Image (cartoon, coloured by chain):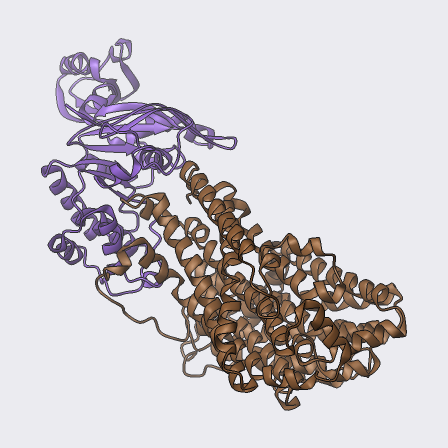
Amino acid sequence: MTSTVTPLDVSGRSAPARIVPDAFTGTGTLVRFGLRRDRVRMSLWLLALTLGTLITAAQYKTLYSTPEERAAAVSSMDSPAALAMTGPRHYLSDYTAGAMLGHQMLGFMAVLVGLMSVLIVTRHTRDEEETGRAELVRSTVVGHHAQLASALALAAVANLALALLLALGLTTTGIDGIGPGGALLYGLTHAAIGLVFAGVAAVTAQITAHTRGASGMALAVIGVAYVLRASGDVGDDALSWLSPIGWIQRTYVFVDNRWWPLGLCLVLAALTAAYGFVLSTRRDVGAGLRAARLGRRTASDALTRPFGFALRLHRATLLGFGAGLCLMGVMYGSILGEAADMVKDIDQIQEALARIGGSTVAESFASMVMVVVAVVAAVYVVMAALRPRAEENAGRAEPLLATGLSRDRWLGGHVAVALAGGTVLMVLAGLSFGLSGAASAGDGDLVLELVGAAAAYAPALWVTVGVAVLLFGWFPRAGVAAWIVPVYAFLVGYLGPILQLPDWTKNLSPFGHVPQLPAAGMNWTPLLVLTAVAAGLILLGLAGFRRRDLDTK
Amino acid sequence: MKKAITVTGLHKAFGRTHALDGLDLAVEAGEVHGFLGPNGAGKSTTIRVLLGLLRADSGGAQLLGKDPWRDAVELHRRLAYVPGDVELWPNLTGGEAIDLLAKLRGGLDLRRRDELIDRFDLDPTKKGRAYSKGNRQKVAIVAALASDAELLLLDEPTSGLDPLMEVVFQDVILQARAAGKTVLLSSHILAQVEKLCDRVSIVRQGRTVQSGTLGEMRHFTRTNVEAETERPATGLDAMSGVHELRVTDRRVNFAVDGAHLDAAIRRLGEFGIRSLISHPPTLEELMLRHYGDELGSNGRAAQGDTGSPVADGGVAR
């Protein structure tokens, strides 16, 4: 670092976009420091994403080694349901193992890489400011753009490292249809989409004063991008062109190997990042762009009860997930009608459906959507059930538990919100899916049918809550392990059919036991068992929390 | 008198750190008891054990005649707590936080709450994240005092408060004492302790090193004497209980044990006293006596026995 002294910029607010030469002083030091802080976290991300890709590629190689097997894969993928979950249809024209990777993995990897990038950026910008650490750092010889610049640089490092690992890894697998050029392009599509969402996070981190809000807004953008490409890939192609995830899928990697869509991503990443820098000069350190509003002078009656209080803390997250799931439901519902029309003549699918139990195409599509919806609801449920831990770590549980509020009632309030919230989210998603599906398929019965199908997942969500509560009560430091439940459910539910995983993998997940309504029939036994398991886990967790020390600052 | 808090031989370890190593504490009902000690001495840990937030490894603790772990909720309805580092909910206003904490404690005196908000000059409509450190402390203090608790556990309650608010705080605590409430006050502000506390306990490394009224404590320690005599004073060095004697011509400086003060002054009188300044040890000096070796190990000379440790910067106020 240099010892330059930046003169006080009194006109800074009136000329927001002007960048003084010292504005980036200290960026290099912060990048090295960030790499030091994130060395484990980042390595795990890169390792998981690379290994996940390589294992999937190896599976494709063994599962689809003959032209006949590949033709079967094409026909099973050529349905609206499958295209909505994967990518554009053009990949099917030359469905090698490489093309399968580009088709089935890119959309879902884009979400994960986006998540990684968003978390890196918010962690090194907004989180630093929220905890007050940024103030300390910014008081040293560090320019006012250095923190955002270093966060973006860290995201770039992670994304480029991932691109390199994927390119090298895939080249060395020696799978037919995966050449070095394609492998490099495949890796770089990940970097490109990661940079786009890093840029998006650079903007959202300026808007709100909360890490949670900043990440939430950026994740919502990822969600919208995913939904746009899903609708576009099934219906009108133009919608996919509105989504950066659609762009990278249109590189048609391992099929056409088009490079230019990456340019679109880079331009968008540069624009969003630059906008983030501009916005950051329009606000104070620690503040958001939206001014903090004054609030109520006294507490309402509801707030002073454990459930009402917990609900207040969970409100924003619950509303966000509610809106997201409704959007998902409407989107998937709107293509339900097309789904039924499109696959009428494909024999394999009819056979596959017959095997499930004589259901219609629309019903089997709906069952598949339910799996995705349930996983999203499970993400909410884990966040909600881990909230007590966050409160405890932040030192906000201590003053409450020093009042007449018992540990059971405090934790119970949060657990009740997680249980009820997860259930409400499922019903909402089922309702919006049902309403929009009934409209598109012209079948009014779908509304109730789909609400029921969605509600059947509630006991599995309760078990997820139970796992988190159990960890909180007995192994509070291992609370993050509760994320395994939705992640595993997603991997098994999403990749299971593609990779033809054995049945027992499904049985390990609470979501694997839920009857696949409406395609399959109703079966109450697993639901009752799941509910009992959930109750047992929660009671056990409460008991553990009653007897352990509170972690204090 | 009835005991409000009795702690005997309390032990608590966090991994390999022994936060409490046989700590004793006795607080009479109706007194304001000062709880002193350096950072990491175990004051907050003790208070958290008393709140039933931490479970002691061994030793006994009783609060208002009950077990702080088993009867936590019942006890919490009769006590109020102010932590030294108040964390508020970012999206709740200060007023909501006050109501929440006071109502959960089991009773909120609305008039008292408004009066306290007024006296502490707090804006209750701001969101938690908008408050400064001092204002967050005010929220917790108001919440604690707005409910009718018979026992107040205050863990460095005024850290971050400005001197004006410090005066208001002292006033409010004296009112609470007058109303018959018991207060355990952990503090680093020695002037506050000298002003408010009936008795103090000094802890160090998880153990109580001294406990009693300030008067009693002073008696056991040395008084500093500074005098000018008509004739050079002699023979003081031979007297027991006299320390750090410095005689320069007709000026004499020394420290004397409480029990030998009388004899030393008589001796001094024999040489014709022209001026005499004597001052009892300040609380700072009392503290430094107990932490002297700690300062020594930090590269400072042991200051506990000397006359002017404060001038040496040994204690930050």
* Rendered residue at 47%/41% (across/down): A540
Quarter of the image where the C terminus of chain B is located:
top left
Quarter of the image where the N terminus of chain B is located:
top left
Quarter of image, res B2 = top left
Q: Is residue B71 left or right of residue A382?
A: left
- Answer yes or no: is residue B303 visible: no
Q: Is residue B149 above or below residue B253?
A: below
Q: Is residue A427 left or right of residue A233?
A: left
* Rendered residue at 64%/83% (across/down): A340
- Answer yes or no: is residue B30 visible: yes
Q: Position of residue B110 (x, y in %)?
A: 14, 55
Which residue occupies the foreground of this view, A143 or A72? A72
Q: Is residue A259 left or right of residue A233?
A: right
Q: Position of residue A247 (x, y in %)?
A: 68, 83
Q: Position of residue A13 (x, y in %)?
A: 41, 79
How many numbered dots are placed on residues in this image?
Answer: 0
Q: Is residue B204 above or below residue A371?
A: above
Q: Which chain is brown?
A: A
Q: Position of residue A364 (x, y in %)?
A: 64, 73
Q: Is residue A182 above or below residue B221?
A: below
Specify the farthest residue to the front. A358
Which residue occupies the foreground of this view, A19 or B296? A19
Which residue occupies the foreground of this view, B215 or A267? A267
Colour seen for chain B: purple
Q: Is residue A403 left or right of residue A341?
A: left
